[in-house]
Amino acid sequence: MAYQLHYWPTIQGRGEFVRLALEAAGAAYVDVARGDEHRGQGMPAMARYLDDPSVARPPFACPFLVDGRRVIGQSAAILLYLGPRLGLAGKSEADRLWTHQIQLTIADLVAEVHDMHHPIASSLYYEQQKHEAARRSVDFRTTRLPKFLAWFEAVLQRNRRNAGRGMPRLVGSRLSYADLSLFQLVEGLRYALPKAAGKALRKTPRIIQVRDGVAAHERVAAYLASDRRLPFNEEGIFRHYPELDG
Amino acid sequence: MAYQLHYWPTIQGRGEFVRLALEAAGAAYVDVARGDEHRGQGMPAMARYLDDPSVARPPFACPFLVDGRRVIGQSAAILLYLGPRLGLAGKSEADRLWTHQIQLTIADLVAEVHDMHHPIASSLYYEQQKHEAARRSVDFRTTRLPKFLAWFEAVLQRNRRNAGRGMPRLVGSRLSYADLSLFQLVEGLRYALPKAAGKALRKTPRIIQVRDGVAAHERVAAYLASDRRLPFNEEGIFRHYPELDG
């Protein structure tokens, strides 16, 4: 049975980290909220899991994955679950936990990217907090972003099990969902903050190699060229507001 | 061999969620950064894991756990690892993942509590962003806090495997690390925002029952009365700034 992914239908957002894993693995899945209401899909199908009191283990928010009777929320937890099933995580407990730990750190950075344009409240428009956003963006560009990227670069550099191979990997010597997420992070940062990301990424050549390798992955490349890949826009996590780019 | 917990020595912070699990289980552990430098502990021991390029899988930040050769960062990932080992998570994959999902949602709320007093930058003092903090606190108190607490209450209410028992549990019918973390959340919220938390918690009687049950747990009670339990203060995640309490 196909996996059901539930996420906002018009943005990449946090759902994209899950979409990329499903696409890279060639897994059968339905992007439910983008489907037809007359076929039991669309937003009402997603809302049911969030609002219906008969759901015993409700997700707090989307994205969430439905696999048979299982309902799994939190993007990093979804990938923890899917990783071994899709061949995108190592076999050992140590490798799986390490891949997950990297993913959680990516999720932390994603949350900071979001809060850069929404430092006061998600429930307010950007225009209602753009002065605070401008202030926050300074710290993000100069402190937080370089710190996170330096860590990912160090993880790639210190990956002994991949030493001597051409393509850097975050965990072991095979592609993992963490590599896919790092690709998405670079794409999003380049869209949102082309100047700041360009500058920061000049110091992290291994991250760029991972990004380029994922972009060239056959199934990922086909996905990126398809209309299943939504474009970045100013409703998602990665938003291009030039005034936040320094 | 005793677990090594590495975390800032003067605050509860994110490390406290791990401490509570270790304490509730009666596990042998060393709170490394609070130990004696002359015995190889203290802050230098913690800093080594963060800074030494020979650490193959470095944590991004503390808290992190060292168990033999394993180094595990991210508080929720540490608890995912410790849960089954300490008897604080269910045996099935589904239960473990659900417990973890709840923990990740608690971690999201903890991050929002932190950013309430630091909406612009962690690297700045509260006094440098108190106007923005006051603005953010309105949304936190009126929108975010009630939404999170309503979700935890719903999770407790819908836990069918615990139906008819006296003590609510987040997962199954036994104490899990998620219950311990919910206790810590209530304690922190009551310290930081006594008025707002008091008001919000009046609508969530099951959360209060979990809190009271954990506080009465024999080993937890002994821990809370010991000097191993650091007091809340204005350096940690949960800070009492009356002007943010409405």
Image: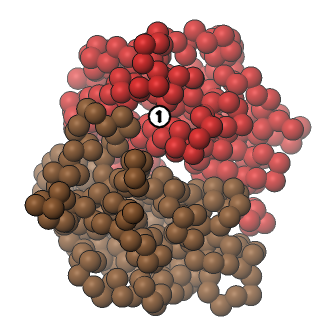
Chain colours: A brown, B red
Query: Where, by quadrant of the figure, is residue A26 drawn?
Result: bottom left
* Image point (42%, 48%), residue name: A70
Q: Is residue A235 placed above or below B205 in the rendered structure?
A: below
Give the quadrant of the N terminus of chain B.
Answer: top right
Query: Where, by quadrant of the figure, is residue A162 drawn?
Result: bottom right
Position of residue B21 in the picture relative to residue B142 (left or right): right
Q: Is residue B16 visible?
A: no
Q: Is residue B25 visible?
A: yes
Q: Report x, y in % for residue B32.
A: 76, 37
Q: Report x, y in % for residue B139.
A: 22, 36
Give the quadrant of the C terminus of chain B.
Answer: top left
Q: Is residue A81 placed above or below B246 in the rendered structure?
A: below
Q: Which residue is mark 1?
A: B237
Comparing B5 with B182, the one in front is B182
Q: Report x, y in % for residue B99.
A: 51, 37
Position of residue B16 in the picture relative to residue A113 (left or right): right
Q: Secondary structure at mark 1?
A: loop
Q: Is residue A108 placed above or below A157 in the rendered structure?
A: above
Comparing B157 with B204, the one in front is B157
* Image point (78%, 33%), residue name: B30
Position of residue A108 in the picture relative to residue B29 (left or right): left
Q: Report x, y in % for residue A137.
A: 32, 61
Q: Is residue B115 placed above or below B22 in the rendered structure?
A: below
* Image point (35%, 73%), residue name: A188
